[in-house]
Amino acid sequence: MEFVFVGGNLALDLLGTLKWRRSTPEEFLCTPADAARWAVEAGVVTVPPRLTTADLDALTALRESVYRLISAGLSGEPARDGDLAAVNAAATGPRIATVLTGTGTARTGTGAAIAAEVAAAAIALLGDVHAGRETRLRECERPACTRVFLDRSRGQTRAWCGMAECGNRIKAAEYRARKAAVRGS
């Protein structure tokens, strides 16, 4: 499986590791090795960490807390205290260590440090959402997709998490519908 980084924020990219939440969920973080690979590909660390099942469980629990907080913020519902506490607790964890090497730098960290980076990214993002301030946070408009992203487009009109999967499918379906309507007339 290949990770996709279309969220525009580390915490949103972690949310993307569980697809199709409303139908048949597809989990991308099935093993500690998957979580370690995600952390490297996401740029959190450059050295693959040795994660445990407990690290994986903590990271996926954090992911779900962040998702519920974002969903609540987007729908105008109050945040759940347990989710706020989980994100805040994770944010107080150890930090990623950046060290100088003979060839540049390396970023290393534990599962708790990876979770702390994700939690810090979530806090930076969710502060505006839960304060009711204008945000560019959007959920993909493809009905089956549950990815959330930051809309950084000039006109703030981005509708899909990404063109490679959702955008192309929606556009192709619209094209087929137009062609069928022309043939049917």
Image (tube, rainbow, N blue to C red):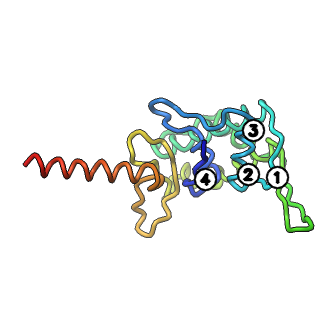
Q: Secondary structure at mark 4?
A: helix
C-alpha separation, residue under disc 4 versus residue under disc 2 = 26 Å
Q: Residue at the location (71% across, 56% down)?
A: 43
How far is the residue under mark 3 from the one under mark 2?
Answer: 11 Å
Q: Circles 2 and 1: CB distance less than 8 Å? A: yes
Mark 3: amino acid: Ala
In the visual, does 142 lie left or right of 85? left
Q: CA distance from mark 3 to mark 1?
A: 13 Å
Judging by the rendered image, the residue that carries numbered circle 3 is 33
Q: Nearer the viewer, residue 120 or 175?
A: 175
- Expressed as whole percent of the image width and height from the top left, the position of residue 135 reads 50, 57
Which badge, 4 or 2, is on the more N-terminal residue? Answer: 2
From this view, report whether residue 3 is shown above or below residue 51: below
Q: Position of residue 32 (x, y in %)?
A: 75, 35
Instruction: Determine the CA span between mark 1 and mark 4.
Output: 30 Å
Name the amino acid type tagged 4.
Gly
**For the residue marked with disc 1, what is the amino acid?**
Val
Q: Residue furthest front?
A: 183
> Mark 1 sits on what residue?
47
| Residue placed under numbered mark 2 in the picture | 40
Marks 3 and 4 sit apart, C-alpha to C-alpha, by 31 Å
